[in-house]
């Protein structure tokens, strides 16, 4: 019997030692479960040729930014709305150093869409050398791309000069993008056949992306919808639900929000207002309501001097009451805008069909068609 006891005791010791040396089999399962429950993500880097001949391209980007955001915000994956991150580059400008490829990252991959808008409206064209390979490589290496295979990661590079310019091999760069599951789409500003001859199609093919061609000088026809006036009125009400916190920086960010409303009004403020009513528009870095929704303690425990005037002098319960009221008011306004947006989209679709010669040869049509196709492959569904 003693021998049996010693034998069983030895087995238990051995089993315990093996368990201590063997990685937990449940750890990968837990990690996988966390990944599966994480919100899906759409990341898009827009690389714009800002040389002297590209004024039309930049104007189209300004005009269509919020329309593109709205389309992305309508997508779902596994029933969840995606986090949308945009990045912005300008390349092909002589006033940027040659040692950095005549390019500049204007905005990193970010959910701060007002930042992207601000930088886009600051672009001024200037003649230069367009190093497409270098621009793509910089975006690959210097943006914080998701490491999740199920997220959608896209680069759109637009221009009108030879794709092979510069010391960086576009072939190697496009191959590197494929290895990282980042799709590179090329947009040639000009005749499609010319873009093929200048290797824009070859770049897209090597990066497993789409080759697109647009008329960068096409004037975007604005269609005024009967819902626009009410959407703009609601946008003013929506702005009043934002409360800046964090001192002067927060005040500046709220002023930036207003400035981007003014910029968008040059094209279509209604499209921007619709974006602001979606989950894609997030401002937890400066808005007390968004910050509270993301993490209650960020505002309830915040120092008095960092709070917006509406919350100063209030205890935690009173702060919470004010924030909850603002949150409900914002949700109500956003819901109203979204309902009007559906009616507006239907009206504009019908009007577009009536317009003779509407071939959809602009930046938004090119990008959205590519995004829908590539997002669908990754399991995204567009409502």
Image (cartoon, grey):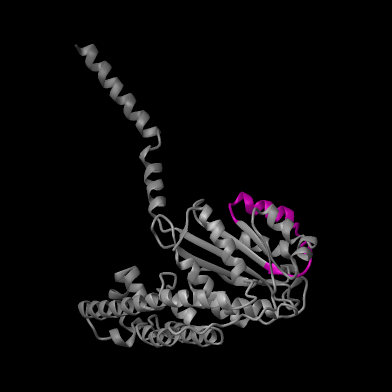
Give above or below for 362 relative to 197: below
Question: How many numbered marks, from 0 up?
Answer: 0
- x, y (%) of residue 124? 67, 82
- x, y (%) of residue 379? 48, 53
Left/right of residue 193 with respect to residue 313 in the rendered view: right
Q: Is residue 168 magenta?
A: yes
Left/right of residue 57 with respect to residue 245 in the rendered view: right
- x, y (%) of residue 223? 54, 82
Which residue sits at x=65%, y=78%?
A: 58
Which residue sits at x=56%, y=58%?
A: 373
Is any part of residue 327 visible from this angle?
A: yes
Q: Nearer the viewer, residue 199 or 175?
A: 199
Q: Nearer the viewer, residue 130 or 296?
A: 130
Q: Quadrant of the N terminus?
A: top left
Q: Nearer the viewer, residue 258 or 230?
A: 230
Q: Is residue 176 magenta?
A: yes
Left/right of residue 16 with respect to residue 89 in the rendered view: left
- x, y (%) of residue 193? 77, 63
Q: Quadrant of residue 263?
A: bottom right
Boundaries of the magenta span: 158-182
Q: Nearer the viewer, residue 55 or 180?
A: 55
Is any part of residue 145 visible from this angle?
A: no
Q: Quadrant of the C terminus?
A: bottom left
């Amino acid at each position: 019997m003693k021998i049996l006891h010693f034998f069983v005791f030895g087995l238990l010791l051995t089993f315990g030692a093996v368990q201590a040396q063997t990685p937990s089999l449940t750890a990968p399962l837990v990690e996988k479960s966390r990944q599966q429950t994480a919100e899906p993500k759409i990341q898009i880097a827009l690389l714009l040729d800002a040389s002297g001949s590209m004024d039309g391209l930049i104007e189209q980007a300004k005009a269509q930014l919020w329309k593109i955001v709205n389309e992305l915000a309508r997508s779902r994956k596994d029933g969840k709305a995606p986090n949308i991150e945009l990045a912005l580059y300008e390349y092909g400008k002589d006033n940027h150093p040659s040692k950095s490829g005549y390019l500049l990252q204007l905005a990193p991959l970010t959910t701060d869409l007002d930042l992207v808008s601000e930088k886009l409206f600051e672009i001024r064209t200037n003649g230069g050398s367009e190093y497409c390979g270098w621009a793509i490589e910089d975006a690959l290496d210097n943006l914080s791309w998701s490491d999740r295979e199920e997220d959608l990661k896209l680069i759109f590079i637009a221009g009108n000069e030879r794709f092979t310019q510069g010391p960086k091999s576009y072939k190697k760069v496009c191959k590197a993008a494929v290895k990282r599951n980042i799709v590179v789409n090329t947009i040639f500003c000009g005749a499609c056949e010319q873009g093929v001859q200048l290797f824009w199609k070859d770049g897209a093919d090597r990066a497993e992306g789409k080759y697109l061609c647009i008329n960068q000088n096409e004037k975007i026809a604005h269609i005024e919808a009967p819902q626009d006036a009410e959407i703009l009125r609601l946008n003013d009400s929506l702005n009043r639900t934002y409360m800046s916190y964090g001192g002067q920086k927060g005040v500046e960010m709220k002023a930036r929000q207003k400035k981007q409303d003014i910029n968008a009004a040059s094209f279509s403020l209604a499209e921007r207002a619709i974006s602001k009513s979606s989950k894609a528009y997030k401002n937890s870095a400066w808005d007390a309501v968004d910050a509270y929704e993301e993490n209650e303690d960020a505002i309830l425990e915040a120092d008095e001097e960092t709070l917006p005037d509406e919350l100063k002098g209030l205890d935690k319960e009173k702060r919470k009451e004010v924030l909850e009221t603002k949150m409900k008011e914002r949700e109500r306004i956003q819901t109203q805008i979204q309902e009007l947006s559906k009616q507006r989209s239907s009206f504009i679709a019908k009007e577009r069909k009536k317009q003779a010669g509407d071939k959809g040869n602009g930046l938004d049509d090119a990008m959205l068609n590519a995004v829908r196709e590539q997002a669908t492959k990754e399991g995204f569904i567009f409502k």
